[in-house]
Each structure stands twice: as C-alpha cells, then as structure tokens.
Amino acid sequence: MPSSTAVVPTAAEASSRIILVHGTGHGGWCWYRVATLLRAAGHRVHAPDLAAFGADARRLRDDDAPTFDDYSRPLLDAVRALPDGERAVLVGHSFGGMSVALAADTLPDKVAAAVFVAALMPDCASPRPDVIEKLPLTDWVDCATDEEHAPPSVLFGPEFMRRKLYQLSPEEDITLSRSLVRVSSYYVDDMRRRPPFGEDRYGAVRKVYVVCGQDQAIVEAYQRRMIAGCPVEEVREIAGADHMAMFSAPVELAGHLADVANTYT
C-alpha cells in the first residue's frame, strides 16, 4: 500500500483518465493537491464542479439544481463526452459517491472502475437514499439547515468542519475550505422517487473502496458496513486520514488512485 512518502505510480503507456468528484458543499477545488500529484505522474485528471458548487455560477436557492440528476449533470456530461471506446476511473468522495453511482448506473460502459473515498456507497437492493438516511452522524454542531425550501439544504459550520471533517488536515486547507464552502443538499426526497440502482448497470461496475481510518463524519465502522453490503473488487486503507483525505493524506490517496487507474484501465 502507498505510504505517505511513496511516489505516485506513473500512468501506464495508454495514459489513464481519472475524474474526481467532490462531496457536499465543496467543489473541484478540493482535489487540487491530489490532482497535481496525479497529473505530474502522467494521468489525465478532471475535477468538475457539480451544479451550484465550486465555481459553478448556478445557485441551489435559485432552483438551478432542483434534482439530484441536475446536481450531478456536470459529471454525467463529462463521462458522456469521453471518446468512443475510452473509459474513465470515477472517484467519489463523501456524498460524491452518490453521483459516481448515478454515473455508473447511467453510463456503465464508460466507467472502468468506481472508487469510493470515505464515500457513501449505495447498494442495489435498497432505496437510493437509504445509505444517507442510515448514516450514524447525529452531532451536526454548528451546521445551518433549511427544511422549508426544496430541496432541503445544509451549510457546514466552521466548528463542524474542524471537528468532523478536517481535524487532521493542514490549517491552510481549513481556511481555504471555509472561504469556499457552499449551501448544499442531500436530495433525499428526490432520490426516494427513483428505483434502486441497477444490478446489471451500477452493480456490474468494478468498485474499490478507500477506507479513511480517522473519519469523524462517515466513521470507519459505517464505511465497512457499506462495503459489506455492496460487493467491491478491493478495499484499500489510509489509517491516518480524516474525512478530507485529499488534504490530510494527499500523497497516499493519489498513490492509491494512480494504482487503481493503472490496474483497471
């Protein structure tokens, strides 16, 4: 397994394509450390902003992303735009795992592997939002929630971010994230209206889970519970990573992702 001092594996001769998908409230910017390491090793990397996040001009409260499909559209468009015969490794962090599952279900032939990094990973038997609703996170600290508008939203508070997401991450990355985090939604009601992800589509895509051992939001026990409920090709571990592994363990994470890309593409 890659260590904190490991060199990120160089891309295979046919350079792999990796699409990095951010989680709730964040944007493609949160992958800047990992994306830089992967590109330096020769991998082709794209970290899109999902609708109403990052630098995307749309706003959740302006009804620009009313459904989960709308929110995930930039990822779906990126996967759909891949040249004929080319597939990508999709990497979802946190809530980004749900968008990766949607892309794998919608365009399975274009997905070489789906990687879940401390991410929500749905199965094919339960309702889509089941994995969100069973998340054993009860202390939202200073997060601001709004259940009165559609879709319901949450804005991460600074103490929640420090205590639950970034407790082992560099101080400068906490500062960066506090300045860029945006109002977000988990789209539970919208996803409940859809059938479970297909066994012959999302279920047939190869999956890898990267467990983050010090995660205080999606705790390790829940990560392993999701793994037990959804078959994966392999499980990798970063014992010293908090929820934001791209900040607390970027070299280890980039090493795992490069190795997965070389293995599955």
Image (tube, rainbow, N blue to C red):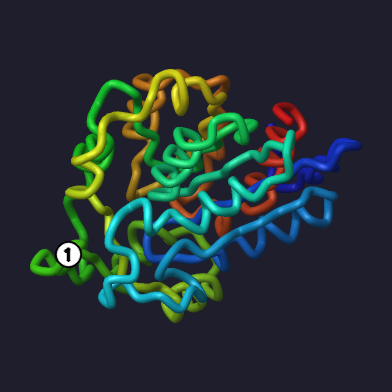
Above or below, 124 relative to 187: above
Above or below, 88 relative to 226: below
**Which type of secondary structure does the marked residue at label 1 adopt?**
loop
* Percent x, y of residue 5: 75, 47
Quarter that holds the C terminus:
top right
236 with respect to 72 (left or right): right
Label 1 CA crowd tier, 10 Å (few <14, some 14–19, many 20+): some
* Percent x, y of residue 60: 31, 71
Q: Residue at x 74, y 27 (%)?
A: 263
Question: Which picture quadrant has residue 246?
Answer: bottom right
Q: Residue at x 17, y 49 (%)?
A: 189
Q: Residue furthest right?
A: 13
In front here: 200 or 179?
200
- The amino acid type, in three-letter code, at marker 1 is Ala
Quarter that holds the N terminus:
top right
169 with respect to 3 (left or right): left
Q: Residue at x 24, y 66 (%)?
A: 154
Above or below, 218 relative to 148: above
* Percent x, y of residue 88: 66, 40
Q: Residue at x 47, y 61 (%)?
A: 50
Q: Residue furthest front?
A: 84
* Percent x, y of residue 165: 39, 58
In this figure, what is the number of numbered marks? 1
225 with respect to 46 (left or right): left
Question: Which picture quadrant has residue 139?
Answer: bottom left
Residue labelled with disc 1: 150
